[in-house]
Image: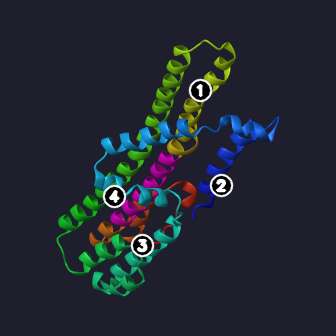
Amino acid sequence: MDLGTILGLILCFAAICMSIMSNSVSDINSFIDIPSLGIVLGGTITAMVVCFPVDQMKNFVAVTRNAMTYTKRDPQRLMELLQDMARRARRQGTLSLEDFIPNLEDPFFRNGLQNVLDGRDPKMIEEVLMTEIDKVEERHKEGADMYHTLGMLAPAFGMIGTLIGLVKMLKDMSDPTAIGPSMSIALITTLYGSMIANCYAIPMAKKLESRSKEEVAEKQLIARGILSILARDSVQIIMNKLNARLAPTARVNKEGG
């Protein structure tokens, strides 16, 4: 699990709750209204079902789990592995790379290298690798879009709940002492919508986009490494190509071969 994401979400909501209870713990009761929460959650969820296909909505839990799961990515280790593979291929031929396959955990890397060993056409291998990367980006974009939509809809339904509360309040103003409490309840739905959007939905969408960039960058590194090895480029040229895709602090020393 990504403790940073989970801790950030908890602290965000906790900071708001602490602010509410700054004068008295009992103040939190004034900010709890089940019907208001029902309007925001019910309206947001049903609107999302309208926005997205059912099959895509079924993946919402998996998307959430992906945002909260940390996958350690080590571009330097990957570069060193590609460097070893390039050196082996230059000295013993591409068929000698078969020894690396059992130790490759990434299916993308393993399948790409297997295509090289099977003697597939380089153009076909490149097309397959790039298509798979595009599909990964597309799939991740769908997940982030769901959370961006959640962040857009929640405040809107919060405002709808507030308008409903105001209409009900203005309809009966015979008791001036009830105006203040009625107004506060009406505004709670806006608070709920804003909290869901800014404390949860939008940060999760940004996290998913960040995760997507990391994974796509890694796969692009793998793809370019495989294609360069297939093209029989020298180790130095391959390292130059791959290092150009990394931050200066993450680059690997080039070795000839």
223 drawn magenta: yes
Q: Position of residue 143 (x, y in %)?
A: 39, 51
Mark 4 → mark 3, Cα distance in angstroms: 22 Å
Residue that sits furthest to the front in the current view: 174
* Residue where numbered disc 4 is placed: 136
Pick the quarter of the image with the N terminus: bottom right
Give the CA separation, mark 3 to mark 1: 58 Å
3 or 2: mark nearer the eye: 2
Q: Position of residue 94 (x, y in %)?
A: 29, 81
Say which residue appears at 29% left-offset and 67% top-offset.
227
| 159 up-or-down from 147: above or below | above
Task: Please give the range of residues in magenta.
Answer: 204-224
Judged from the image, the secondary structure of the residue bearing numbered disc 3 is helix
Mark 1 or mark 4, earlier in chain: 4
The residue tagged with tag 1: helix, strand or loop? helix
Q: Position of residue 131 (x, y in %)?
A: 25, 59
For disc 3, the marked residue is 82
Near mark 2 (Cα within 10 A), the count class, few <14, some 14-19 or many ≥20, is few
Q: Which mark is residue 187?
A: 1
The amino acid marked with disc number 1 is Leu
Q: Is residue 209 visible?
A: yes
Q: Amino acid at mark 3?
A: Leu
Label of residue 7 in the image: 2
In percent of the image, x 79 and y 41: which residue is there? 25
Looking at the rendered image, the disc whose residue lies closer to the viewer, 1 or 4, is 1
Residue 223 disc label: none
